[in-house]
Amino acid sequence: MIRVLIIEDDLRIAEVNRRFVEKVEGYEVIGIATNGQEAKDQMEILQPDLVLLDIYFPDMDGLDFLSIIKEQFPTTDVIMLTAAKEVDAVVEAIRYGVFDFITKPLIFARLQQTLRNYQEFRQKVSDWKKDTDQISQAQIDELITRTGQKKATETRAVKGIDQITLDKISGFLMQIQEATTDLVSKETGISRSTARRYLEYLVAKGDAIADLSYGVVGRPERVYKSVGRQKE
């Protein structure tokens, strides 16, 4: 299990983030810190594998705390979850080596993909360490570019698939667990043909499954179910 510490001053948001994280198989939230002192204490006591860190706190700057994590807890990785979208903040976070930077309001599908990318990243590093104590240039390049960036590029390269629309539909499906094309079209404001194309893309990726629902009359209707439903 990947052990996660959430550092977020709004307890309601922290609880939502906790539920989101624990929907992804292989993760457990071991603590929630809502201020600077709690964050320092829990970092020292819990030694988490991964931290979900906000930027703005009443008593500290998240970027300053990020530098503390990198200096004092070098084996702990960080994902920034914040409403801050300023260029300087993003650039500074990247310079400190965050694994990802996700802006609020948080879309579950976006966080889910990042957490899966992080699992893959850790697994690759673990496998490489087992094989040899040396690393090739190709492996270095892969670590630097990271799996998440590669997958984002692959998604953009698929004709007719927009990442924002994909995140919206995936997040909606995860929220309600299962839906028809008509329901997705109605709730997201996109056409039925577009909804069907994105739902089928999620099925092809393995993020959803499709089944048939047989009503009293008429043809059977295709129903799409979030993979998350199968894991619970």
Image (cartoon, rainbow, N blue to C red):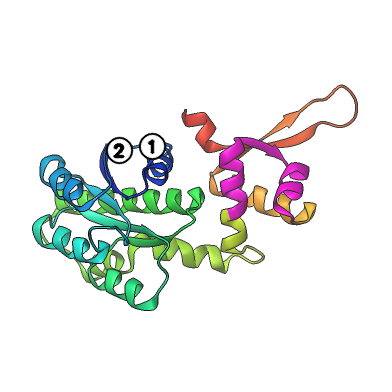
Range covered by the magenta-colored residues? 168-189
User: Quadrant of the rendered structure where residue 5 is?
Assistant: top left
Height in image: 52 above or below 99?
A: above
Front residue of 228/21: it is: 21
Prevailing secondary structure of the magenta residues: helix
Residue 164 highlighted magenta (yes or no): no
Question: Is 148 on the left-hand or right-hand side of 161?
Answer: left
User: Quadrant of the rendered structure where residue 197 is?
Assistant: bottom right
Residue occupied by mark 2 = 29
Q: Position of residue 51 (x, y in %)?
A: 26, 51
Residue at 22% in and 71% down: 137
CB under 8 Å between discs 1 and 2: yes
User: Quadrant of the rendered structure where residue 134 is?
Assistant: bottom left
Residue 179 highlighted magenta (yes or no): yes
Residue type highlighted by circle 2: Val
Residue type highlighted by circle 1: Glu
Residue occupied by mark 1 = 22
Q: Distance between the Cα atoms at labels 1 and 2? A: 7 Å
The residue most toward the bottom is 88
The residue most toward the top is 216
Q: SS of the residue at dot 2?
A: strand
Give the quarter of the figure containing the N terminus.
top left
